[in-house]
């Protein structure tokens, strides 16, 4: 089990303000098979505040976190599930989203617990099962297919 601060996360993810949507990694759990990414799971935290840039227009009188931002936050947690300390620098990009469901609105003051588990690993393609919870309530879920590209310096 591994935890990470935002400073450590930013060494892995290329995202920066206003597009980094995870604040902390609470845990990374290895899968059942040593050395395999299959079954690897990351649990991340996103504290939602009124200062988020998207609340200016979504919506001024009733601020709700956009679904596409929830998807991105879950995908960023998935990147952290995929990443291992000795990996070369890489980018993980969303290729498709299936079975996305948004069950309850996410509003300022909520703490999102994001979970992403690798359910299929094909080398440079992986399938993630992602969920987002506020307290014990499921607020969003999706399957995210992602592609990996290695960075050249």
Image (cartoon, helix red, strand yellow):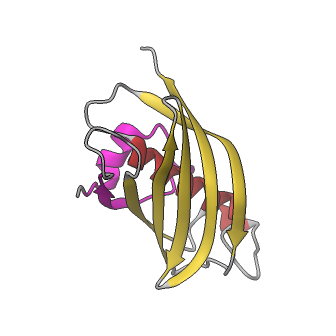
Q: Residue at x 59, y 40 (%)?
A: 146
Magenta region, residue range: 3-30
- In the rendering, at what x and y percent does residue 105 appear? 67, 79
Q: Residue at x 54, y 67 (%)?
A: 131
Residue 149 seen in render: yes
- Nearer to me, 37 or 15: 37
How many marks the image carries: the answer is 0
- Nearer to me, 119 or 58: 119
Identify the image quadrant of residue 94.
top right
Give left or right: position of 88 versus 132: left
Residue situated furthest front in the rendering: 33
- In the rendering, at what x and y percent does residue 14 appear? 47, 37
In the displayed structure, 107 sits above or below 24; it is below
Give left or right: position of 104 versus 33: right
Give left or right: position of 2 versus 96: left
In the displayed structure, 76 sits above or below 136; it is above
- In the rendering, at what x and y percent does residue 70 appear? 62, 62
Identify the image quadrant of residue 129.
bottom right
In the displayed structure, 63 sits above or below 129; it is below
């Amino acid at each position: 089990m591994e935890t990470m601060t935002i400073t450590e996360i930013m060494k892995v993810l290329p995202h920066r303000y206003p597009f980094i949507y995870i604040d902390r990694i609470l845990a990374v759990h290895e899968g059942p098979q040593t050395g395999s990414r299959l079954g690897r799971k990351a649990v991340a935290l996103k504290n939602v505040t009124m200062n988020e840039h998207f609340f200016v227009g979504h919506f001024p009188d009733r601020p709700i976190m956009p679904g596409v931002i929830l998807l991105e936050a879950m995908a960023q947690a998935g990147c952290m599930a995929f990443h291992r300390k000795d990996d070369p620098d890489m980018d993980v990009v969303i290729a498709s989203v299936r079975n996305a469901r948004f069950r309850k609105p996410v509003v300022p003051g909520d703490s999102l617990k994001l979970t992403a588990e690798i359910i299929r690993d094909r080398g440079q393609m992986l399938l993630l099962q992602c969920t987002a919870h506020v307290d014990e309530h499921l607020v969003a879920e999706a399957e995210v297919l992602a592609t990996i590209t290695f960075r050249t310096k």
